[in-house]
Image (spheres, rainbow, N blue to C red):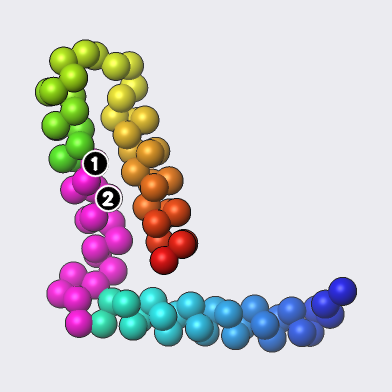
Amino acid sequence: MISKKKFKRLWGLSLSIAEAEFKLRNEGSYLGILWYLLEPLLMFILLLFVFSKSLGQDIPHYPLYLLVGIIVFNFFQKVTL
């Protein structure tokens, strides 16, 4: 079993590493952190427009299903890379 003191130290180290990696990923980007919001939003708008027009069917709550799917997909994509 890990002690509380060791856990706090490891937690702080993990947060420091995550913060450094986050800053490194956004370094040199014009929009920086804003990309984390814009990318899924633009994908949502594009897919909503394309599939709502091409399917021709009115699927109840389709925008909600699409948004949840994009959020889950992006979560797994960011976690596994």
**Residue located at (58% from left, 80% from top):** 14
Q: How many marks?
A: 2
From this view, report whether residue 18 is shown above or below residue 70: below
Amino acid type of disc 1? Phe
Residue located beneath label 1 in the image: 44
* CB within 8 Å, label 2 to label 1: yes
State the image coordinates of residue 41 (x, y, percent, origin top left): 24, 48
**Residue located at (21% from left, 13% from top):** 57
State the image coordinates of residue 58 (x, y, percent, origin top left): 24, 14
Disc 2 and disc 1: Cα gap in Å? 6 Å
Residue located beneath label 2 in the image: 40
**Residue located at (18% from left, 19% from top):** 55
Per the image, label 1 sits on a secondary structure element best described as helix
State the image coordinates of residue 43 (x, y, percent, origin top left): 22, 46
Instruction: Give the main secondary structure of the magenta stretch.
Output: helix
> Image quarter for residue 61?
top left
From this view, report whether residue 34 is shown above or below residue 76: below
Amino acid type of disc 2? Pro
